Image: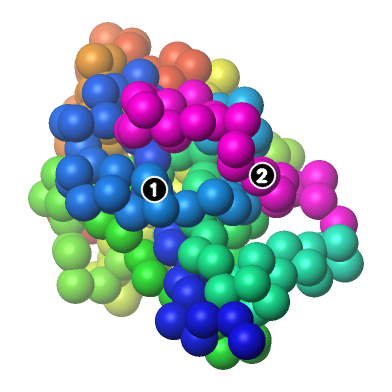
Amino acid sequence: MPDKKAVLFLIPVTLGETPVSRVLPEYNAGVISGIKHFIVENIRSARRFLKASVPSIDIDTLTFYELNEHTDPKTIGGYLDPITKKGMDMGVISEAGCPAVADPGALVVEMAHKKNVRVVPLSGPSSMIMAVMASGFNGQSFAFNGYLPVKPGERSAKIRQLEGRAWKENQTQLFIEAPYRNLKMLETLVSVCRKDTRLCIAAGITCQEEYIHTHSIEEWKKISEPPINKVPAIFLLYHS
């Protein structure tokens, strides 16, 4: 019979080229050392992260199951077999930050609960939470909205909707953009939003290129181009 105490660990990773020791507790490395099966968004980057976390780890003895936007959900039914059939702990690793948050890892976590598998989230950096922390906006009521529409008209309408919620509901609104379109997003925001709405841009969090600034839309119009091109960023809207 498999060990009923086997666990699915959700293992955060760094948000960029940041030393593991800066943002992840030593406890995580101990957990990683005891796991042989990992469900990962990208095998290559997961192997690199594991080696950085536990230099002595023997990568060739590990088994990886890939889970990303290209994975057919119908194929992941057996991903948890090492836990349910062999009683072996498993780990879930995302590309950046916390797994299962704006991440396909949520699918396997959902499956784990259906199979009555214990799920344990480990401590680590979350760009969304850290952005809220650093923004100066409402940290008691906030919403993450993922990517906004690409088409200009639809995007502008969505921004106005989120801005309206920030003002009417006193709720911080978070969203993201493909890093190479960050400056285009800023251009759209300053042209669509009311001048007294406040915008925070939190880019490169925990990394060398970290840039976190909050200004009114009117102030952003007067600021020189921020260094956020091709840098992962969180955009936050809130009222004045």
Residue 102 appears in view: no
Secondary structure category for the residue under label 1: helix
Residue 51 place in picture, x, y as percent:
42, 27
Q: What segment is highlighted magenta in the picture?
A: 47-72
Where, quadrant-wise, is the N terminus in this rendering?
A: bottom right
Q: Badge 2: few (under 14), some or many (20 or more) residues near its Cα, within 10 Å?
A: some
For mark 1, what is the residue? 32
Q: Amino acid at mark 1?
A: Ile
Q: Residue furthest front?
A: 1
Residue 222 appears in view: yes
Question: Nearer the N terminus, badge 2 or badge 1?
Answer: 1
Residue 153 place in picture, x, y as percent:
68, 44
For mark 2, what is the residue? 64
Q: How many marks?
A: 2
Q: Badge 1: few (under 14), some or many (20 or more) residues near its Cα, within 10 Å?
A: many
What's the residue at 53%, 60% (across, down)? 90
Where, quadrant-wise, is the C terminus in this rendering?
A: bottom left
Task: Please tell me whether residue 146 is drawn above or below residue 161 in the rendered image.
Answer: above
Secondary structure category for the residue under label 2: strand
Task: Please tell me whether residue 151 is drawn above or below residue 82 in the rendered image.
Answer: above
What's the residue at 27%, 30% (across, down)? 20
Image quadrant in which you'd find residue 96: top left
Can residue 54 be found in the magenta stretch? Answer: yes
Residue 30 place in picture, x, y as percent:
28, 49
Residue 3 place in picture, x, y as percent:
52, 81
* Closer to the camera in the image, 13 or 130: 13
What's the residue at 16%, 51% (across, down)? 133
Q: Is the Cβ of the residue at disc 2 closer than 8 Å to that at disc 1?
A: no
* Closer to the camera in the image, 144 or 126: 126
* Closer to the camera in the image, 240 or 39: 39
Q: Is residue 104 left or right of residue 139?
A: right
